[in-house]
Image: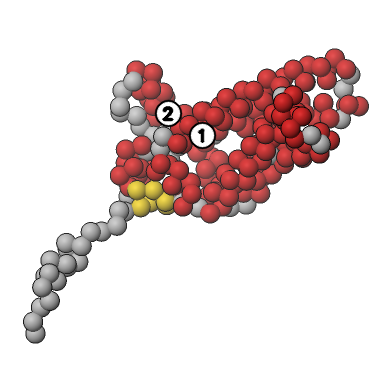
Amino acid sequence: MTSTPGWAGRTDVTMPRPPERLLRFTRAERRVHRATAALMLTCLATAACLYLPPLAELVGRRRLVVTVHVWCGLALPVPLLLGLVFRAVRADVSRLSRFSAADRAWLRAVRTRTSDRPAGKFNAGQKLYAQWTLGAMLVAIGTGLLMWLTHLAPPSWRTGATFVHDWIAAAVLVVTVGHVLMAVRDPEARRGMRTGTVERAWARSEHPQWEAESRGGDAG
């Protein structure tokens, strides 16, 4: 039997293999992230329409904007609470709520600008961001309720709540912009959130302990 010219080199050994990928986020985890992000961005957009006169004039319908802002704000914890039904989401919450020696080493490495930065599935920066966001979310909801339900507190409390609510919103905007910019700089991290999987080489570089855990090694 004669062979077709050029066929001999195209064997299983020499054919390019697709990069090995690791499951980073399940569908439930990705949906919790997307739903929370959609609600947060809606809150920020409606807040801008309420506080910036040019946008307020452009959009109009202030009562509708207020209604959307209030209900999206109250709904912010809902995706996470619903996601806790899933084991993967509970595992992520547990990881994000605990700091280890590796996290402290990661923060030292960032401060000294060294490249050896140990990290599990989430590094220390991601844990700080998640914890800060959750705290800011709860403060925003609490102060927002005091502003919305005027009978809950005296005027002085509502004045203080308005001050805190406004500055928390500004801080959330700054931190969210930073979060988005960091995601733009890391296409593989974005792909992991979009598709659920990442390349093993990226995991070994950015989250070495988690990559080792996926191979059955020491998670650190």
Vertical placement of residue 111 versus 204, above or below: above
The x and y percentages for residue 29 are: 54, 48
The x and y percentages for residue 85 are: 62, 52
Q: Which quarter of the picture shows residue 112?
A: top left
The amino acid pointed to by label 2 is Asp
Give the residue displayed 30% in from the left and 44% down from the top. 201
Vertical placement of residue 201 versus 10, above or below: above
In the picture of the structure, the residue carrying the numbered disc 1 is: 180
Image quadrant holding the N terminus, namely: bottom left
Upstream in sequence: badge 2 or badge 1: 2
- In the displayed structure, does residue 123 sit left or right of residue 20? right
- As drawn, the label of residue 103 is 2
Vertical placement of residue 14 versus 210, above or below: below
Residue 86 visible? The answer is yes
Give the residue displayed 67% in from the left and 38% down from the top. 42
- In the displayed structure, does residue 150 sit left or right of residue 74? right
Q: Secondary structure at mark 1?
A: helix
